[in-house]
Image (spheres, helix red, strand yellow):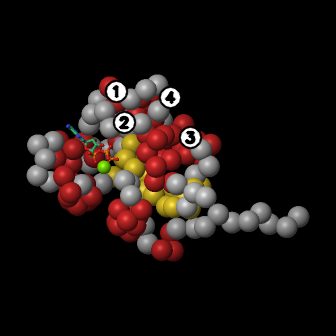
């Protein structure tokens, strides 16, 4: 049985600015991932630097920070069976140039940097990344339908 997991999703500035937010969120729900929390924000450079601190020694770090703080992003908490890998499968490979059509990065990204979406890479990283953007009161379990 697949474990129910949570993961952090970021719809990156390239995809938000081209009006793809709704289409991308639909793909999450269509794939059985519930949206437990959702907000549209603009990252400061400091927030982007902190979020991608694991890449701070990489040559692309400063460009990545500039890109991630260049416009609005939509961050969400997704929950469902195998949410971490299911979400990353929907994103496709990191490089949008190599991502097949039908994946989020293949359909809405441009290149290896402007690649439309971020997804946590493990349940432990997801916990840290979720706490980076949301406090516990902002994360809502799916509510059962009200009785008729
Ligand atoms: P993400 O962490 O955003 O979900 P990922 O796990 O597929 O993507 P990482 O290796 O963690 O890939 O890289 C983080 C982000 O840094 C990528 O999504 C991309 O935007 C950018 N990036 C990665 N490699 C490069 C590169 N060689 N040149 C420019 N940008 C890059
Ligand atoms: Mg990553």
SS state under label 3: helix
Q: Name the residue under label 1.
A: 98
Distance from disc 2 to disc 4, alpha carbons, whole Å, reads 12 Å
Confirm whether residue 119 shows in the render.
yes
Q: Residue at x 35, y 62 (%)?
A: 125
Distance from disc 2 to disc 1, alpha carbons, whole Å, reads 7 Å
Instruction: Give the side of residue 59 with respect to residue 2, left or right.
Output: left
> Which callout, 1 or 3, points to the residue nearer the camera?
1
- Using the image, tell me which numbered label, if any, was put on residue 27: 3
Classify mark 1 as within 8 Å of ligand 1 or not, answering yes or no.
no
Confirm whether residue 35 shows in the render.
no
Instruction: Give the side of residue 113 with respect to residue 38, left or right.
Output: left
Distance from disc 3 to disc 4, alpha carbons, whole Å, reads 10 Å
Neighbourhood count class around disc 2 (C-alpha, 10 Å): few under 14, some 14–19, many 20 upward: some
Classify mark 2 as within 8 Å of ligand 1 or not, answering yes or no.
yes
Q: Which residue is drawn at 43% across and 45% down?
A: 88
Q: Where is residue 69 in the image (x, y as percent from the top left)?
A: 26, 48
Q: Name the residue under label 2.
A: 93
Q: Which residue is drawn at 59% across and 44% down?
A: 31
- Using the image, tell me which numbered label, if any, was put on residue 102: 4
> Which callout, 3 or 4, points to the residue nearer the camera?
4
Say whether disc 2 or disc 4 marks the residue closer to the N-terminus. Answer: 2
Say whether disc 3 or disc 4 marks the residue closer to the N-terminus. Answer: 3
């Amino acid at each position: 049985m697949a474990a129910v997991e949570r993961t952090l999703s970021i719809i990156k500035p390239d995809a938000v600015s081209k009006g793809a937010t709704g289409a991308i969120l639909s793909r999450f729900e269509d794939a059985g991932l519930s949206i437990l929390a959702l907000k549209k924000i603009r990252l400061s450079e400091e927030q982007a630097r902190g979020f991608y601190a694991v890449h701070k020694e990489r040559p692309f770090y400063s460009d990545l920070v500039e890109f991630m703080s260049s416009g609005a992003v939509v961050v969400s908490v997704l929950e469902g069976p195998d949410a971490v890998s299911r979400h990353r499968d929907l994103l496709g490979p990191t490089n949008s140039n190599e991502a097949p059509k039908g994946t989020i990065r293949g359909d809405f990204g441009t290149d290896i940097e402007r690649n439309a979406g971020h997804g946590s890479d493990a349940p432990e990283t997801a916990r840290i990344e979720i706490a980076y953007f949301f406090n516990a009161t902002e994360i809502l379990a799916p509510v059962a339908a009200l009785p008729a």
